[in-house]
């Protein structure tokens, strides 16, 4: 079962095993409780394998911050840990692109990645002398990006918080315009 990584094929195999189980039950060939237990365990393990492969496939196919933040991010499982690494890499990349779009040069901004603990996503932050942007997964759908004015790179409270969906950062030109419209630039 674990050799096949195609989720559709795995689900097809599981479906066949469930059909076999149903046939045995209907024919009342389930007098041996050990055989029934073994068959149910096989189905359960196959389901676990299928879900693992489906999650891995989702992480591999994630092409945007919106994709990566569509489910909670933590590091309880290897798949979750992979999703968390991809999130931090993608968020830092998009924030670097945003800094370039805003005309910032090296040394005029900091990008920090705080991976935090196993139970949470952590956050990635772009901090300039006048702007603070933090990307996370913790506050819910549509509020993955927090941004505000600030007075310096030592200012961690700044002006009032504003929020945007993670997908906004997938298009840095559009997000730069949104920052201007919000009056934080």
Image (tube, rainbow, N blue to C red):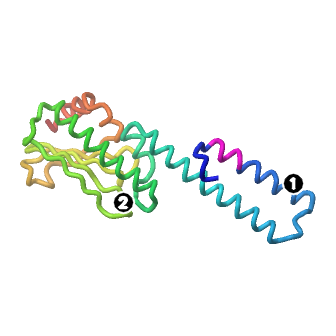
Residue shown at the point (38%, 63%) measured from the top left:
119
Q: Which residue is mark 1?
A: 23
Q: Position of residue 109 (x, y in %)?
A: 11, 43
In this figure, which residue is indicated by the disc labeled 2?
A: 120
The spot of residue 177 in percent (x, y) is: 22, 29
Residue 51 image point, x, y percent: 58, 52
What residue is at 90 percent from the left and 57 percent from the top?
A: 26
Range shown magenta: 8-13
Please state which of the two labelled residues, at mark 1 or mark 2, is closer to the viewer: 1
Q: Earlier in the sequence, mark 1 or mark 2?
A: 1
Residue in the image at 26% along x and 40% along y: 93
The C terminus: image quadrant: top left
Residue farthest along the front direction in this orientation: 3
Residue 62, placed above or below residue 154: above
Residue 71 to residue 27: above or below: above
Q: Position of residue 105 (x, y in %)?
A: 9, 35
Few, some or many residues within 10 Å of mark 1 (<14, 14–19, 20+):
few
Spatial CA span between label 1 and label 2: 44 Å
35 left or right of 166 in image: right
Corner quadrant of residue 179: top left
Q: Secondary structure at mark 1?
A: helix
Q: Residues within 10 Å of mark 2 (few under 14, many from 20)?
A: some
Pick the front one: 6 or 67: 6
Helix, strand or loop status at disc 2: loop
């Amino acid at each position: 079962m674990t050799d096949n990584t195609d989720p559709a094929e795995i689900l097809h195999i599981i479906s066949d095993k469930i059909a076999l189980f149903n046939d045995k039950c209907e024919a009342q060939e389930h007098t041996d409780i050990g055989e029934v237990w073994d068959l149910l365990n096989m189905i359960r393990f196959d389901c676990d394998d299928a879900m693992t492969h489906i999650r891995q496939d989702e992480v591999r196919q994630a092409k945007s911050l919106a994709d990566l933040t569509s489910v909670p991010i933590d590091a309880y499982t290897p798949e979750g840990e992979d999703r968390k690494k991809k999130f931090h890499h993608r968020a830092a990349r998009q924030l670097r692109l945003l800094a370039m779009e805003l005309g910032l040069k090296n040394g005029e901004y900091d990008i920090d990645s705080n991976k935090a603990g196993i139970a949470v996503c952590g956050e990635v932050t772009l901090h300039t002398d006048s702007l603070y942007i933090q990307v996370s997964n913790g506050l819910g759908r549509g509020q993955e990006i927090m941004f505000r004015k600030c007075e310096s790179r030592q200012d961690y409270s700044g002006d009032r918080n504003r929020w945007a969906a993670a997908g906004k950062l997938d298009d840095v030109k559009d997000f730069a315009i949104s920052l201007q419209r919000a009056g934080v630039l």
